[in-house]
Every structure is written in structure tokens, then in C-alpha cells.
Amino acid sequence: MDDIRRQSLPTEGDQSKSRVLVVEDEPSIRDTIVYALESEGIDVDWTASGAEALTQIESVDYQLIVLDVGLPDMSGFDVCRTLRETNPVPVIFLTARASEIDRVVGLEIGADDYVTKPFSPRELSARVRANIRRTSLNTTATPFPAKVTEAKVAPSGLPFEIDHDRWVIHYYGHALVLSRYEFRLLAVLVEKPGRVYSRAQLMDAAWEEPDASMERTVDTHIKSLRAKLKAQRADIDPIQTHRGLGYSMKEHW
């Protein structure tokens, strides 16, 4: 990498075990982020290159990526889109573009959060901690056989298995690579097959700030879910579209 800065400071909770990759090409902004996160006891690596970030992520188990949209070699959107093909690690976009369109595009691609410049280092640190905490059971899990068994839900007659503790959904025995929003959407549909959910209801179930998104974001995530399900069973389309109403999980297979 261009440079790697790591520091482990004593702190409470799991944050001392967390490792974050900062992808930012502006040195002053990058240094501010690195300092803020290291002060929270988080180990930080950084790079100014999108391509190098993708290479680094393949070899390191990061708990979160802070990703600038305007990188010199490739768009942060493209980095996230490529990453989401194989990796569900949380992504926080960092950008000077504050328009609603950019925000929605980022969320549609699979980002978990969005921070605009100028930003408060304290706010960014809080969002990083919140996202790591939200997925910590999935990324740093140790064996808990009883709890894992209790957390798994397999609706009668459906080939899904949901592990809420670890944020994992299995489909025909295969673990799906899902973003946080995709996991929530699919879990809602699977747990009540046959029930038709409006886009507004799905947004309320999956997004922390549903009013900040657009309903077409749901359509994009459903499209992504369908592609991932068909990659396992091309002959089955379990998610049904109800024109003018919303979506449901097929009740009878």
C-alpha cells in the first residue's frame, strides 16, 4: 500500500479488535480520519487507490471500509460495486457530493452509510463504531452452538435458513453474500411467505432512515437479491412482484 498506519490503543468493548481500511486520496482528510479512528482504538490501514484497495481487501479481513467516491484511478462507486460481488463488509461512502441522487446511487450499489464533506471526525467515528457493532457477531464470531441453533429460522417448505446472530442467510445450503439491506429485505420476505409488502413497508423494515431514501432503492435491492438467488438455482424465482402493490416471497414451491 502507499502507507500503512496501525495502532492498537486500550479501549472498552470489541473496538480494540476492529480493523478498518480508509480509501482516501486527500492527505489532510485521510490523516484526520486515521487519527480519529486510531484514537478510538481501531487499527487502520489506508490507501489512495481504488484498485489497490480491492487487492488489499482480498487478503485482509476488515470490519469496515471508509471509501471516498472521488478517487484518482476509479470511482468509489465502482470499487463498491466490485466489492459487493463477493464481500459483504460494511462500507461508508465519503464524498463532497451532497445531492440526493448521489446518496441513493451509493445505497443502491450496496453502501451501508454515507458521510459528506466537510464532516465531523467525531460523527464519522460514531458511524464507524455503529456499523462495526452491527455486524460484529458475523465478522468476529466465536462458536456458540446453542445460540446459533436457536437463531436459525427455516420457514416450513422453504429452502432458506436465517441466522440473525451472524447476519447470514443460507439458500439451498449455500451462504449468500448479502449487504446489510439485502439481508434485512430477504429476511422479512422469507419469514412471512405469501404476505405482500409494499415498498414503503420494506423500507421501514430495512433502512434506519427510510425517509432519506427513495422507493426505487427497494427495487434495485430486490433485483440484486434475485440475481444472487438465481446464481444458486437458475430455475427458481422465489420473489414475486405484485404490480402496484409490492413484493412477496413465494408461499408454495
Image (tube, rainbow, N blue to C red):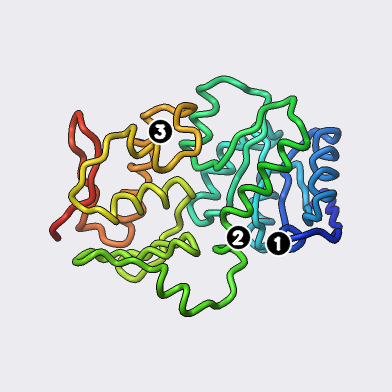
- Evaluate if marks 2 and 1 touch, with contact meaning CB atoms under 8 Å apart: yes
Looking at the picture, does residue 218 appear above or below residue 143? above
CB under 8 Å between callouts 3 and 1?
no
What is the spatial separation of the Cα atoms under label 2 and label 1, in whole angstroms? 8 Å
In the rendering, at what x and y percent does residue 242 appear? Answer: 18, 37
x then y, percent, for residue 229:
32, 56
Cα separation between marks 3 and 2:
26 Å
Say which amino acid is labelled 3: Thr
Q: Residues within 10 Å of mark 1 (few under 14, many from 20)?
A: some
Q: Which tag is nearer the camera, tag 3 or tag 2?
A: 2
Residue type (three-letter) at the residue carrying disc 1: Asp
Secondary structure of residue under mark 2: helix
Q: Name which of mark 3 and mark 2 comes first in the sequence.
A: 2
> Helix or strand or loop: what does disc 3 sit on?
helix
Residue marked by disc 3: 217
> In the image, 118: left or right of 39?
left
Task: Return the disc, 2 or 1, that comes first in the chain's sequence.
Answer: 1
Which residue appears at 49% of the width and 27% of the height? Answer: 212
Question: Residue 172: where, in percent of width, then height?
Answer: 30, 68
Residue at 66%, 41% (x, y): give it. 67
**Amino acid marked by disc 2:** Ser
Please give left or right for residue 83 compared with residue 251 in the image.
Answer: right
Q: Quickly name the residue at label 1.
A: 14
* Residue for point 52% across, 54% down: 88
List the single residue furthest toward the left: 252
State the mark number for residue 136: 2
**Is residue 46 at least partly visible in the picture?**
yes
